[in-house]
Image (tube, rainbow, N blue to C red):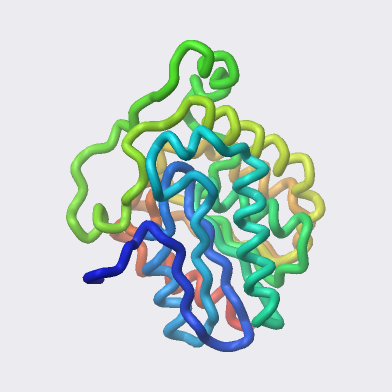
Amino acid sequence: MENIDLKQEFFFSGNETGCLLIHGFTSTPAEVRELGENLNKVGYTVLGVRLAGHGTVLEDMEKFKYTDWIQSAEDGYARLREICSTIHVIGHSMGGVLALCIAENTQVNKVVALAPALVTKDPVAKYAGIAKHFMRYSQWTEGERPEEESQYLLGYSKIPVSSVHELNKLQRFTRKSLHKITQPVLIIHAMKDNAIHERGIDLIVNGVSSNELKRLHLKHCGHNITVEEEKGKVFQAVIDFLEP
């Protein structure tokens, strides 16, 4: 890991099947890097994009709208499309919502939503459109983590309230067109997740038009399922699901 800026996008060359990896809200590509490494080990070409306004300084995030995050993901898809004949899209948290959004409008083969943040648990989040006029930032409430987890969790320590409003808009935008998704879908989420609401999972399950939909419930970890104790189970489930 020395001399590697984990906050930046990553690309691992492989076969003609590409995997587009999308990180979450206020986070960085680091949180999905290990998943990308594991996918590359079994042969896939992998691109982990960095969403607009992420992985730099907090003030940058306030400059961008939810449409810019969609554009970041679409740009990654276009880059993979130039070199890959088949593309799978995989996202964590808000990245899971963006993965669904991409699948609604492009030719992807399979979709993986990891702890997808289609509905958040924070009851105050829905008022962000009003709160942003009175409050610029809110604080993440995060406890201590072991080094093997924290080294990949390099996101902002504060949350721009205006960006929460943009997340709300992305959620609504994506929910409207879930029926367009006909591709196979895998949803992995944790029972102890304190960030996303189970209702969002139900909306995906009941909203997509896919004939193949698989779910995996994790029992021991929280929201950051790509770096926490059950990450190995997550990696293997994704690899198994993507097999031709």
**Picture coordinates of residue 115 (x, y %)?**
49, 50
- Most foreground residue, 187 or 94: 94
- Most foreground residue, 140 or 203: 140
Residue at (30, 31) in percent of width and height: 141
In the image: residue 63, left or right of residue 225: right
- Of all residues, the one furthest to the top in this rendering is 134
In the image: residue 128, left or right of residue 156: right
Quarter of the image containing the N terminus? Answer: bottom left
**Quadrant of the rendered image containing residue 7:** bottom left
**Picture coordinates of residue 27 (x, y %)?**
41, 48
Q: Is residue 234 visible?
A: yes
Residue at (75, 61) in percent of width and height: 210
Vertical relation: 103 (above or below) 119: below
**Picture coordinates of residue 19 (x, y %)?**
57, 72
Q: Is residue 188 visible?
A: no
In the image: residue 58, left or right of residue 108: left
**Picture coordinates of residue 148 (x, y %)?**
22, 60
Residue at (25, 53) in percent of width and height: 150
In the image: residue 54, left or right of residue 5: right
Vertical relation: 109 (above or below) 63: below
Quarter of the image containing the C terminus? Answer: bottom right
Residue at (46, 39) in percent of width and height: 60
- Most foreground residue, 76 or 153: 76
| Total labels drawn | 0
